[in-house]
Image (cartoon, coloured by chain):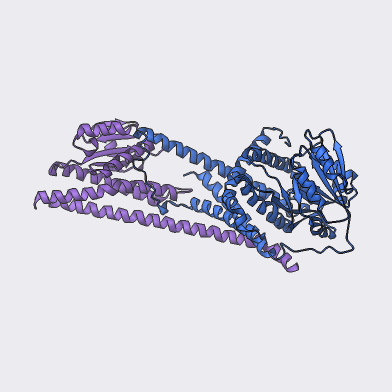
Amino acid sequence: MNIWFNVLMYLVWFLATFYSVYFFLTIAVYRKDLFEKRKLPRSFRPRVTFLIPAYNEAKSIADSLKSMKKVTYKNIEFIVLNDGSKDDTSKIVRENIKGDDRFSFIDNKENKGKAGVLNQGIKICTGDFVACMDADSVVEPNIVQKVIPYFLDEKTGAVTVSVEVKNPKSFLQKAMAVEFAIGLSLFLKIFSYLKCVFVTPGPFSMYRKSMLNEIGGYDETNITEDHEIAFRVNKSKYNIENCIDARVYTILPRTFKQLYVQRRRWYSGAIQTFMKHRKMMFKKESGFFGVYIPFHYTLIILGLFTFLASIYLSISRFIREILYYQYTGFNFFDHFSLSLDPLMYGRVNLLGTSLVAAAMILMIVGIIVTRRKFRNYNLGLIGFPLLFILYQVYWGSAIWNAINNKKVKWR
Amino acid sequence: MTKQKSVRNYLPVIAFAITLFLFLSVIIIGNILNNERQDFVAEEMQKMYSDFNSMQTLSLIMGDYDDEMVCIAFESKLQELDSYIWTLAEKIDKYRIVTEEFQEDEFYLKQKKTFNENEIFYYLMMRKMNRQCNMSKEPLLFFYQNSFDCKKCDDQSFVLTDINEDDDDLENEVAIFSLDVDLNISAVDMMTKYYELEEYPCLIFSDGTRMCGMMDKFIIERKLCEINPKLMICE
């Protein structure tokens, strides 16, 4: 009888189920509005600036620039900001933007960091609205027309879009494609309804420039500037909206090592941001955001403890059972049988199974309501649940780094 | 939008209510499974009582009727009983672990106690019939404590399960009786005093040999074969 593990399991189950149910209910309430198309009035054609920071993006920036050239919105400028790249980024940018006067290029020789060059761009840009975009991402031609109407509401400070995976090839990328379809598409939409969007994704997010000036642009000391800025947008009383219908396609890590580097930064940045803005929590003026964020992280931490406890219990049991066999001459297969006793299924097993079922339902609902096709996600649907295990490892690593005051670099 | 807004305000309450409902459903399903487990154990225990009664009857009629016939009937009953008695003891322990989440379950404690008492009865009956019917059933007593106080008791139990399974595959010639010394059963207490047991796990063989501490499968089998070389596991 592992009383503490059982207590933890019950607690996590209750919080996670509440979270899932709340989420499903919100989807049900807003299901008809998810893909609501906002019209762009003729009188509203504000100037838009795209800021594209680039560091060693020689392999991918050409595709990105090509997609920008196809953007059909007229009143627009593109500013590419080299962040001291050591590869041919600068040369490729110059070749690709030649002859297109919508583009300008700032070739910084020194590395300022992503937030640093974005702030540089914010200072010099002429747009009323600023779209910050990663240099390895590709946008739809009509993305601005889809996004800009959201800013007709003066309270809208930022608009996020659906972040899609560009050409997912590896098993990992396919699993992450499902993760993004849910996490960086449907979740962002639902969070926008609940007024608790806590990230304006780096691949593409558009901001009201006056708001950026008000809040002081990006935090150059933060390793997840797109996460941190979302906290300050919420603090500033502006809303973050989501246009689920607009899409940006981004390149994802191919290997587990690359994914680890990315997530270690994301999760370490999340801890850094939370600590910086902890005073926002449970404050009336922070609204639902101030309640949701602590709930979210409590669930993550409890989930991590449950995961670690399960791993510990499973491994110790496995080792114990293996050690038993030393007394019987390691006759593993002498009495091997696959018979299952359904009565060995206790309440804790029921709780665990129902949580896995909820994650699967969430995945299926996510694919359906975001109008995607299951056949595009075949392998990803199998891989997505496995990502939950990796999340725990990455969160564990990030928390460990935070406890040990170890600094995590952007790259 | 206004309607949505008003619905939105109630969402946390509705979500909480649904979560509570799901939680209660899990509790109820858990209780149903607990009851199923208890029913299973109770049913098996009932079967055991009934077999014991038959054996008792057979032992009482011995002498008045054809002894050979009684011995054959008795041996067959023992064979039958032996095939599930160890499994039943294991099930009681396993079901108890699954059921007990926050506190000890009285049902399983009670069942375990009754089971142990009956095991002693079965053991004594078997010894008697071994003498009277010249049967070659080899009894083995296993005294154990809870895993907190006795670090090797679970290991020993695993080994005995393995020997029991080997024996089940053959002729069911070895009858292993597991006796929990923590249950304060007077007969078990008396036996521990009789055999002067102080450390656990402890095994008592039919020739009175006492082996305390962790014993591997081969030591136990060697001893069993030394006592009774005709056992199938010795071949």
Residue B176 position by quadrant: top left
Instruction: Give the camera-side residue of A374 and B119.
Output: A374
Instruction: Give the camera-side residue of A37 and A324.
Output: A37
- Can you tell which chain is drawn purple? B
Residue A30 higher or lower than A213, as above or below: below
On the picture, is A82 further left or further right than B174?
right
Q: Residue at x 68, y 36 (%)?
A: A402
Residue B190 position by quadrant: top left
Residue B70 lies, in percent from the top left, at 13, 51
Furthest residue in direction bottom, as rendered: B3
Is the C terminus of chain A in the top left, top right, bottom left or bottom right quadrant? Answer: top right
- Residue A82: in sight, yes or no? yes
Residue A235 lies, in percent from the top left, at 80, 50
- Can you tell which chain is drawn blue? A
Task: Count the labels in the image.
Answer: 0
On the picture, is B62 further left or further right than A403?
left
Instruction: Give the camera-side residue of A391 and A25.
Output: A391
Instruction: Give the camera-side residue of B15 and B120.
Output: B15
Q: Residue at x 54, y 48 (%)?
A: A9
Residue B195 lies, in percent from the top left, at 26, 33
On the picture, is A186 further left or further right than B221?
right
Q: Residue at x 25, y 55 (%)?
A: B50
Residue B6 lies, in percent from the top left, at 72, 66
Residue B63 higher or lower than A91, as above or below: below
Residue A62 position by quadrant: top right
- Residue B113: in sight, yes or no? no
